[in-house]
Image (cartoon, rainbow, N blue to C red):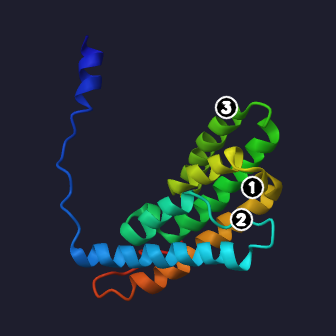
C-alpha cells in the first residue's frame, strides 16, 4: 500500500499556477506568432505552391508557442528549435522507411527515439516529437520528400520562424531573445 500512496501523492501538485502574462507580453507573443506562421505559410502557398515541397507542418504551431510566447525557456532557444526539428525529422523519416509496414511501431519509435536523441544532444524541443510523428503519419506528399523533409520543411521552416523570433522579440522593450545560441 505504501507504493501506491507515494505514487498518487505525486499527482497533487506542489505549486500554484503562474500568474497571467502582462498584456504587453500577450500582444508581442501574438505579433511574433502571426508573423512567424505567416512567413512559413506564405512560403508554402505562394513560393512553393507549384512544387511537391511542403512548408507548413503542425509542429510549427507548437514551436510558435515556445519561441514567441515562452522565449526564456531552454526549450525555445535556437539550438533546440533548429536541432530538435531537424534531428527529429531525420529520425521520423528513418522510422517510416524501415517500419512503414507497421505504422503503430514506426510512430512509437519515431517519437520516443526523437525524444531520446534530443535529450542526448541537448536539443530538446517538444514540437520535435510532432515533427518525427508527422514524418510517419503524414501525407503521401510528406513521404515522397524522404530525407529532404529534414531540410524542407523542418529545417527551413524553423529557420524562418527563428529569424522572425529574433527580429520581433527584440523589438519589445522588456524582451530579449535568444538567451543563448549554442
**Looking at the image, which is closer to me, 146 or 9?**
146
Task: Answer with mark 1 or mark 2, whichever residue precedes in sequence.
Answer: 2
Which x, y percent locates residue 50? 80, 73
Q: Residue at x 23, y 19 (%)?
A: 5
**Mark 3 sits on what residue?**
104
Verify CB contact (< 8 Å) between mark 1 and mark 3. Answer: no
Which x, y percent locates residue 113? 63, 43
Q: Which mark is drawn over residue 142?
A: 1
Q: CA distance from mark 1 to mark 2?
A: 7 Å
Task: Answer with mark 2 or mark 3, whichever residue precedes in sequence.
Answer: 2
**Local crowd at mark 3 within 10 Å, few (<14), some, or many (≥20)?**
few
Locate residue 157: give its quadrant.
bottom right
Q: CA distance from mark 2 to mark 3?
A: 24 Å
**Local crowd at mark 1 within 10 Å, few (<14), some, or many (≥20)?**
many
Q: Which mark is drawn over residue 55?
A: none
Indicate the quadrant containing the N terminus: top left, top right, bottom left or bottom right: top left
**Looking at the image, which is closer to me, 154 or 84?**
154
Mark 1, secondary structure of its residue: helix
Residue 59 left/right relative to 107 = left
Locate residue 137: give its quadrant.
top right
Q: Residue at x 29, y 24 (%)?
A: 7
**Can you see residue 172?**
yes
Q: Residue at x 39, y 86 (%)?
A: 170
Q: Which mark is drawn over residue 54?
A: 2
Which x, y percent locates residue 165? 47, 78
User: Please, is residue 86 above or below residue 68 in the view?
Assistant: above
Residue 174 left/right relative to 119 = left
Indicate the quadrant containing the C terminus: top left, top right, bottom left or bottom right: bottom right
**Looking at the image, which is closer to me, 35 or 65?**
35
Q: Residue at x 76, y 43 (%)?
A: 96
Task: Answer with mark 1 or mark 3, whichever residue precedes in sequence.
Answer: 3
Mark 3, secondary structure of its residue: helix
Amino acid at each position: 500500500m505504501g507504493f501506491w500512496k507515494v505514487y498518487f501523492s505525486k499527482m497533487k501538485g506542489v505549486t500554484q499556477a503562474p500568474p497571467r502574462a502582462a498584456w504587453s507580453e500577450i500582444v508581442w507573443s501574438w505579433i511574433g506568432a502571426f508573423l512567424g506562421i505567416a512567413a512559413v505559410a506564405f512560403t508554402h502557398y505562394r513560393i512553393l505552391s507549384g512544387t511537391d515541397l511542403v512548408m507548413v507542418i503542425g509542429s510549427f504551431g507548437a514551436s510558435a508557442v515556445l519561441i514567441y510566447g515562452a522565449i526564456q525557456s531552454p526549450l525555445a532557444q535556437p539550438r533546440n528549435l533548429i536541432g530538435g526539428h531537424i534531428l527529429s525529422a531525420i529520425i521520423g523519416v528513418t522510422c517510416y522507411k524501415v517500419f512503414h509496414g507497421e505504422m503503430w511501431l514506426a510512430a512509437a519509435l519515431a517519437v520516443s527515439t526523437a525524444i531520446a536523441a534530443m535529450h542526448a544532444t541537448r536539443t530538446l524541443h517538444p514540437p520535435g516529437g510532432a515533427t518525427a510523428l508527422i514524418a510517419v503519419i503524414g501525407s503521401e506528399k510528406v513521404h515522397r520528400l524522404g530525407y529532404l523533409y529534414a531540410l524542407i520543411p523542418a529545417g527551413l521552416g524553423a529557420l524562418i520562424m527563428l529569424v522572425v523570433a529574433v527580429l520581433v522579440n527584440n523589438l519589445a522593450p522588456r524582451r530579449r531573445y535568444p538567451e543563448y545560441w549554442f
